[in-house]
Image (cartoon, helix red, strand yellow):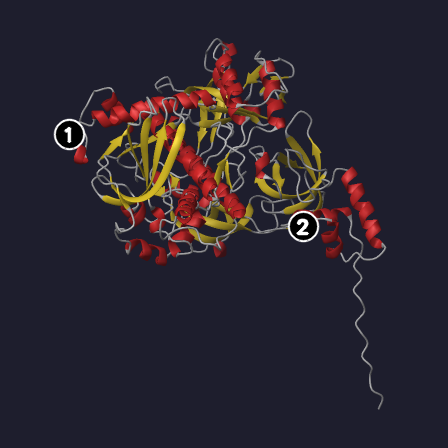
Amino acid sequence: MARKISQPPPKKIIPFPTKEEILEFIQESPQRVGKREIARAFHVRGDMRAVLKDLLREMEKEGLINPGRRRRYGGGALPPVAMLEVTGTDLDGEVLARPLTWDEKDGAPPVIYMMPERRGHPALGAGDRVLARLKKLSGEAAYEGRTIRRLTSAPPQVLGVFGMEGGEGRLKPTDKRAKGEYLIARDNTGGAKPGELVWAEVLPGRRLGLRQAKVVDCLGGTGGVSSISMIAIHGREIPYAFTAEALDQAREAAAAPLDGRQDLRAIPLVTIDGADARDFDDAVWAEADGDGKNPGGWRLMVAIADVSWYVRPGGALDRCAHERGNSVYFPDRVVPMLPEDLSNGWCSLNPDEDRPCLAAHLWIDAKGELLRHKFVRGIMRSHARLTYTQAEEFHNRKTEETTGPLAKKSIAPLIGNLYGAYRALDKARRKRGVLELDLPERRIVLAADGTVARVEVRERLDSHRLIEEFMITANVAAARELERLRQPCMYRVHDQPSREKIEALAQFLESVGIPFARGQVVKPARFNRILSMAKDTPNPRMVSEVVLRSQAQAEYAPENIGHFGLALTRYCHFTSPIRRYSDLLVHRALIAGLKLGAGGLEKDHEDFTALGEHLSATERRAAAAERDAVDRFIAAFLADRIGAAFKGRINGVTRFGLFVTLDETGADGLVPMGALPGDYYVHDEARHLLRGRDTGREYRLGEEVEVILAEANPITGGMIMHLLDGSESGERKKTKTKTGKRVKPSPKRRRG
C-alpha cells in the first residue's frame, strides 16, 4: 500500500492593502506606525515594498496621513478619510460622530454630522464605528461625514426611567439629546418597576413607531429630586461603590506615629473653607519673616493631610482612588475618592485633633516672589475651622468668635498675618499677568426635604483669593522640589490657545470693534487687555465668554509645558490629595525623593503619560456629571413655572438654535431654530450669531433676551424656551411649544 505523502498547506494569499485598510490599521494602532509596521501587518515583501512606499507617498500627498506622524491627525484638522465613532444625535436629530483617535491637546474634537445611510442600509446608532469620507463645512468648525464602510456595530445602551403606558413598557432616556422613547416588551423588562432608573440595551432592527430595547440592569427608584445626582452618576459611569477590602482598610486605619515626623502642633494652623465643606485637607499659617535680609517678607506654612500614609501604592484603597481619579461634588452629596473613614476622618484636618501632614515651609519677599521652600513630614493640629465669611469678618474686625483653641484668645494677629502675606502674593500675581476670567459661579441651596430652595451666585471674597494664592505658591514649590530631586512629577499643564482658536477669536473681536493684532506672542496679559477694553462695549460678558472658549483645556501630564492661565513655567497639584489622585502622586514623589518614610512612589510605578491621560479624563467626566446634576436640579426647580417669562442672555449660537442662560438661576435652555420669528436663519460661526436671510434680524452671543419657559424636564435636565419678540413693543407673544400647544403666561405668575 502506497504511503500518502503529506503536502504542505498552501500559502494564504493576502491581497495588497487598500488605502482604507492602511488608514484603518494606522488609526487602530496604539503605537506610532511607520512603513515597516504596515508592511509587516499586511505581509508585504520583496518588490511589493516599493509599491507600498509609492502608495504611502500618494496618501501623504492626498492628506490622508501626516509625514512623520502616521498615527493621528491634530491641530484641529481632520483628514479626508478617518475612522469615526457615532456618539448619538443632537437636538435636531442629526447623527453626530467623533474621530476615533484624537489628540486632546488640540482641544475638543470638531463636530461631525453624518449623512443618512444609503437606502437598504441600517441607520447608524451610538457606538457604531465607521470608516468615513469627511468634508469640512464652509464657515464652520464642523465636518460632514459619509460612510465608506461600517466597521463594528455595538448594541448601544440607554440610561432611562422605566414606565408603563397603555399596558406596554416604555423607557424615557435621561439624555436630553435623545429623540424619543423606547418600547420595552413584557419579556424584556428585567423585573423593572415603574419609576425605576434602568440601563437598557437597544435591540437591532426598526419597526414602524418606537425602537425597542431590553432592560439589562435595574438601578433603583427615581422618586423626587433625591435621585437626580444618581442619574448623573450612572449616566457618566462614575464609580461610587468601594470594594469591601478598601472599606476594611479605611476602617482599620489608626493614628500615624510621631516617630520620624516633625511636631508642628504648637503652630496655630487654621483651615479656611466654605460653610458647606465636607472635608478639610489644607491648613495655613503666616508670620512676618524675621530675617533682616528679607525686609517686608513673609514666612508661610501650608500643611496638607498626609493621605499617602494611609493609601499605599497598589493597595485596595489605591486601586479605588486610581479608578475614580477624583471626588465628584453634587448639590446633595459627594462621591468621594476615598472612603469617609479617611476623607472625613484621619485625612481631614479637623480642629483640635492630631493629624499627620506633609507641610510646605515657604519664604516670600515683599513682592510675593517665592525665595525658598522646604517640605517636611509632620504631625499638626488645626487650631480653628474657619469659613471664608468668618475669615473676612475677622479681617474687617466685625467678629472675634471662633472654635477650637483659638476661641480663648484673639485670632486677629494670625488673620492679619495671613492677609499681609496674601497682599504680597497678589502683587506677584498681578506682575505675572494671570488670566483674569472671574466668571460668576452658581450655587444650589437645598431645603430640608432635598428640594431646591434657591439658586444664588457664589460670593467671591478676598479670603477665597487668599487661600488660592497660598495653594498656588505651595504647588509651585512642589513642582520645583520634584525637579530638583529629579523625581517624576505629574504636572498640571495648560497650553496656550491653538492658532485656529486665536484666529476665530480675532475675527469675532473685529466684528465687535475690538482691535486684535495677529502675529504677536500670545500671553494672558493680552487677553486681560481685551477684557478691559470690552468693559466699554455694550456686551462685556459676551467678550468674556468668547475669550474663555478660546482657551485650551488644562490637563495632567509628566511633560512640563507650563501653565498658560496662571503664567507659570512649572506647576503641579499638591494641596488636595483627599480628592485628587494627581496630588497623591506628587506627595508620594516628594516622600520618595526626600526619603521621608513609607508611602512614596515605587520604582515599578505605572507609566505617568498614560496615568496623566486617565486623570485628565476622570476630571472631565466628573465636571460633566456635576453639570448634568445642576441642570436637572434647576429644571426640577423651574418645572412648576412653565409659561413664565424670564430675562437672560444668549450664551450659545448653533446651527440648530440659541442657548439662553437665565439671569435669575443661571439655567441653560434651548430656543430651537423653528421657534425663532419667521425667517430662514444663517449661522455665522466666526461672529457667533444667527442672521435672518430676509429680515436681517440678528441674534448674537451675549445679547440680552426675554424668553418664555416652554418645557423643563428634571429627568434629562433639558429646557425648551421661546423668545418674546421685542418688536411687539414688549407685549408677550403667544408662542407654540414643541407639542403644538399655545403658551400664554398667566398674569399671576411672577416674572423671572
Where is residue 403 shown, x and y percent of the image?
Answer: 18, 33
Q: Residue furthest bottom?
A: 1
Where is residue 85 shown, x and y percent of the image?
Answer: 62, 44
Q: CB atoms at circles 1 and 2 under 8 Å apart?
A: no
Which residue is located at x 36 percent, y 55 percent?
246
Where is residue 747 shown, x and y percent of the image?
Answer: 37, 17
**Label 2 Cα crowd, 10 Å radius (few <14 / some 14-19 / many 20+):** some
Which residue is located at x 80 percent, y 74 percent?
8
Where is residue 671 shown, x and y percent of the image?
Answer: 52, 25
Residue 123 left/right relative to 631: right
The kind of secondary structure element at disc 2 is strand
Can residue 154 be seen at all in this image of the molecule? yes
Name the mark on residue 409: 1
Taking 255 as reference, is 503 above or below it? above
**Label 1 Cα crowd, 10 Å radius (few <14 / some 14-19 / many 20+):** few
Q: Nearer the viewer, residue 477 or 734?
A: 477
Taking 720 as reference, is 319 above or below it? below
Residue type at mark 2 is Leu
Report, in whole angstroms, how far the alpha carbon at label 1 lies from the one at label 2.
72 Å
**Rendered-image quadrant of the C terminus:** top left
Image quadrant where residue 4 sits: bottom right
Residue hosting label 2: 151
Image quadrant where residue 347 sits: top left
Residue type at mark 1 is Lys
Name the mark on residue 594: none
Can residue 640 be seen at all in this image of the molecule? no
Q: Earlier in the sequence, mark 1 or mark 2?
A: 2
Q: Residue furthest left?
A: 408
Residue 249 left/right relative to 742: left
Picture mark count: 2
Q: Nearer the viewer, residue 89 or 722?
A: 89
Taking 700 as reference, is 298 above or below it? below
